[in-house]
């Protein structure tokens, strides 16, 4: 199973774009700027919202804190994926 994720650079870029496009859910820019570099921020949940965009729920740290970001279908499709191990 694969899980899409944001890099910090993608998160900054797509968050700014979400704000400019006046989408419903985005992150405080100063918070995003303070996130660590070279970390993958996995998307825990993603679903079609209002038939116009993807709503993503992003894991922001190792404590499980989350944020929501609405992005275009095209931007969602462009995100990379990482493999996820299934624990049995």
Image (cartoon, rainbow, N blue to C red):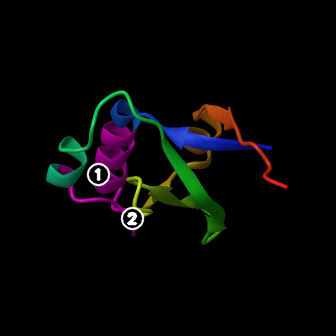
- 32 sits to left or right of 79: left
| Rendering quarter of residue 51 | bottom right
| Rendering quarter of residue 22 | bottom left
Frontmost residue, 24 versus 83? 83
Give coordinates of residue 73: x percent, y percent: 62, 48
- Image quarter hosting the N terminus: top right
Residue 78 disc label: none
Q: Give the extent of the magenta segment.
A: 11-29
Residue that badge 1 annotates: 20
Label 1, label 2: how far apart the Cα atoms are: 25 Å
- 65 sits to left or right of 88: left
Frontmost residue, 18 versus 28? 28
- 34 sits to left or right of 2: left
Give coordinates of residue 75: x percent, y percent: 54, 40
Q: Which residue is drawn at the image coordinates 65% and 39% (left, top)? A: 77
Residue that badge 2 annotates: 65
Mark 1 or 2: the one toward you: 2
Give coordinates of residue 69: x percent, y percent: 43, 59
Label 1: element kind: helix
Task: Looking at the image, tell me whether mark 1 or mark 2 is earlier in sequence order.
Answer: 1
Q: Which residue is drawn at the image coordinates 22% and 59% (left, top)? A: 28
- Image quarter hosting the C terminus: bottom right
Give coordinates of residue 40: x percent, y percent: 47, 37
Indicate whether 30 appears above or below 40: below
Frontmost residue, 15 versus 88? 88
Label 2: element kind: loop
Q: Which residue is drawn at the image coordinates 72% and 42% (left, top)? A: 84
Q: Which residue is drawn at the image coordinates 35% and 36% (left, top)? A: 8
């Amino acid at each position: 199973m694969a899980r899409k994720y944001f890099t910090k650079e993608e998160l900054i870029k797509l968050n700014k774009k979400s704000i400019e496009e006046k989408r419903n859910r985005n992150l405080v820019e100063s918070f995003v700027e303070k996130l660590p570099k070279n970390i993958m921020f996995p998307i825990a949940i993603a679903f079609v919202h209002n038939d116009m965009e993807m709503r993503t729920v992003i894991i922001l740290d190792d404590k499980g804190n989350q944020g929501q970001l609405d992005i275009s279908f095209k931007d969602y499709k462009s995100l990379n994926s990482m493999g996820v191990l299934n624990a049995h």
